[in-house]
């Protein structure tokens, strides 16, 4: 019979695991608002300092699919503790870095430690709840998934507004990491036999190498493709070829050996395979929206980093409230299928309505689209988290969770890469269309030009020719701003298109309602405990 933690002990496990997951995910977006300050401080360009984001993302996506194997090999608690310590120590050295190479190197190490926190936190959290209440655990973990990337810009903006040293965006992890490490040592127990299988497990060195090359190069292409002008760059072309070969050989290798570093055979389960596609798409929606909205708000609408982050908070509170409610409903036997369908529709609505705003919007004009996003994430994430282990054998849970989390991270990288390319393309198109209207035969243009010219002349006393030249420059800046605004709005609609494309797959999912406590649940609980 399994003895699940209750009361204070369970609350501590929940706080520890959710805090670790939020901490890891905050660091995927907190740097976004600090790039300008970091680049100026260490004397490099914005393009160069963007490696701080790229290094973390590559490390994350390499380590996440390996967490199941590494947890089994070293013992889950040991691996979790070491990863937390690595993340915390690397956070300090990131903040203390004085050069780009040093910062990027520590950021990569931080990503190695952080990537393990996500999947391992989920597994530990699920183990703290009996199967009939596992949907509640999924709801709590889902809160962390949504809250982390959304809090990043807010926390980053708050720190940058109040501290001169940008290093504090990394130092903020240190007290949280120390407390989480202590709580893990004190309150999270090892499972029976944990870490004792080390001698009987053969390390798949070939699989690890292929995974690092294939997925690492793919992430590099997605992260750096736009900055390097995609396949016109030899580096991007070579990385793309390496990614294709590495992933292809990796899949072939992992399917033919007995003890793979990533158990891809679990994707034979149709529910997990389709769920992985949905999770990839939800990653597109989650990370792309958190990336596009802050850039639009600061670059076009003139918001400060703190204003931008605060605008994201009220809708996010909706998701925080919704997750436990949905988890409780699912734990009582409600079918997850309506939630997935409604969640997809809310995300489609988010992209569509987000693309309808104009350049005169204020902070609260985005509340409704962002609220749609919050509802969509809360209704979509929990069933997907639960479905990632539905139909799997207990010994396969770690692999299912790891693949699911990796697909979300890759979805985010893919969404941001596609969005950057799409924005550049649409900007060029919109600017060309707008410039076509700038000619003296256009009455609206001539009236605007004359009005601005007269205003400059009256204000500065400039001669008409110089005032006219300045008026042209002002109009050009307005055209530029409008072209960018339209391109960002098009990108919101692009998010809707991703969800529309995958929507028909929902009818291939076979998700049953969460059963209530009975003999089957007790047997399943016993099997899960033995597996972990």
Image: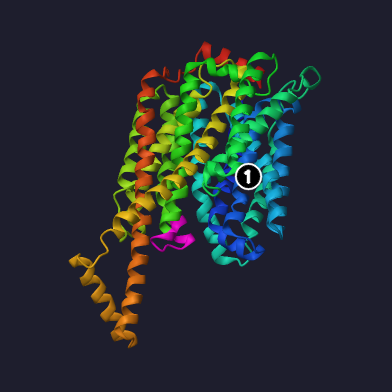
The answer to whether 53 appears left or right of 360 in the picture is right
Q: Can you say which quadrant of the picture contains the N terminus?
A: top right
Looking at the picture, how far across and down is residue 103, in whole percent? Answer: 69, 53
Q: Nearer the viewer, residue 161 or 263?
A: 263
Side (left or right) of 515 relative to 238? left
Task: Name the residue at 66% across, 63% down.
Answer: 42
Rendered location of residue 25, percent (x, y): 57, 43
Classify 362 as above or below 243.
below
- Helix, strand or loop for the magenta stretch, by majority: helix
Q: How many marks?
A: 1
| The stretch drawn in magenta includes residue 302 | yes
- Residue situated furthest right in the rendering: 199
For image coordinates 33% across by 47% down, the residue present is 354
Residues rendered magenta in the picture: 298-310
At 41% across and 64% down in the image, what residue appears?
302
Residue at 51% in and 26% down: 133
Kindly give the residue lying farthest to the left in the view shown: 443
The spot of residue 117 in percent (x, y) is: 64, 37
Please name the residue that numbered disc 1 is placed on.
56
In the picture shown, does residue 293 fall above or below 456? above
Disc 1 secondary structure class: helix
């Amino acid at each position: 019979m399994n003895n699940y933690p209750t009361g204070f002990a369970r609350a501590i496990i929940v706080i520890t695991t959710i805090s670790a997951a939020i901490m890891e995910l905050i660091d995927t977006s907190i740097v976004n608002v600090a790039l300008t300050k970091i680049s100026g401080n260490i004397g490099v360009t914005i393009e160069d300092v963007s490696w701080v984001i790229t290094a973390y993302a590559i490390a994350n996506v390499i380590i996440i699919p390996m967490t199941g194997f590494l947890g089994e090999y070293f013992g889950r608690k040991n691996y979790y503790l070491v990863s937390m310590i690595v993340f915390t120590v690397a956070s300090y050295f990131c903040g203390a870095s004085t050069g780009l190479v040093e910062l990027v190197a520590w950021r990569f190490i931080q990503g190695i430690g952080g990537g393990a926190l996500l999947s391992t936190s989920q597994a530990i959290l699920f183990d703290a709840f009996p199967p009939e209440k596992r949907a509640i655990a999924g709801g709590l973990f889902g809160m962390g998934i949504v809250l982390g990337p959304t809090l990043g810009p807010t926390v980053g903006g708050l720190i940058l507004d109040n501290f001169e040293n940008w290093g504090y965006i990394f130092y903020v992890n240190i007290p949280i990491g120390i407390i989480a490490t202590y709580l893990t040592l004190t309150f999270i127990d090892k499972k029976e036999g944990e870490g004792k299988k080390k001698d009987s497990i053969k390390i798949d060195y070939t699989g690890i190498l292929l995974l690092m090359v294939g997925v690492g190069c793919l992430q590099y292409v997605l992260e750096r493709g736009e900055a390097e002008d995609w396949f016109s760059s030899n580096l991007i072309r070579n990385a793309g070829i390496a990614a294709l070969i590495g992933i292809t050989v990796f899949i072939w290798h992992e399917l033919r050996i007995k003890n793979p570093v990533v158990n891809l055979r679990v994707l034979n389960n149709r529910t997990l395979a389709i769920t992985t596609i949905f999770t990839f798409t939800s990653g597109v929606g989650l990370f792309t929206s958190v990336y596009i909205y802050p850039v639009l708000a600061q670059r076009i609408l003139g918001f400060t980093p703190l204003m931008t982050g605060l605008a994201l908070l009220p809708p996010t509170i909706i998701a925080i409230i919704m997750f436990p409610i949905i988890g409780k409903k699912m734990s009582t036997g409600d079918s997850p299928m309506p939630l997935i369908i409604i969640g997809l529709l809310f995300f489609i609505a988010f992209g569509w309505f987000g693309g309808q705003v104009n350049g005169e919007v204020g902070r609260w004009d985005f509340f409704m689209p962002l609220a749609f996003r919050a509802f969509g994430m809360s209704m979509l994430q929990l069933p997907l988290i639960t479905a990632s282990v539905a139909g799997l054998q207990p010994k396969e849970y770690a692999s299912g969770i790891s693949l699911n989390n990796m697909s979300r991270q890759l979805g985010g990288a893919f969404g941001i890469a596609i969005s950057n390319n799409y924005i550049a393309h649409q900007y060029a198109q919109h600017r060309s269309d707008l410039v076509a209207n700038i000619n003296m035969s256009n009455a609206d243009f001539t009236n605007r030009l004359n009005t601005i010219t007269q205003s400059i002349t009256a204000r500065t006393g400039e001669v008409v020719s110089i005032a006219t030249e300045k008026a042209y420059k002002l109009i050009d800046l307005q055209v530029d701003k409008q072209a960018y605004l339209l391109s960002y709005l098009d990108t919101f609609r692009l998010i809707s298109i991703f969800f529309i494309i995958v929507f028909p797959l929902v009818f291939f999912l076979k998700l049953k309602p969460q059963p209530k406590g009975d003999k089957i649940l007790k047997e399943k609980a016993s099997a899960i405990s033995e597996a972990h």
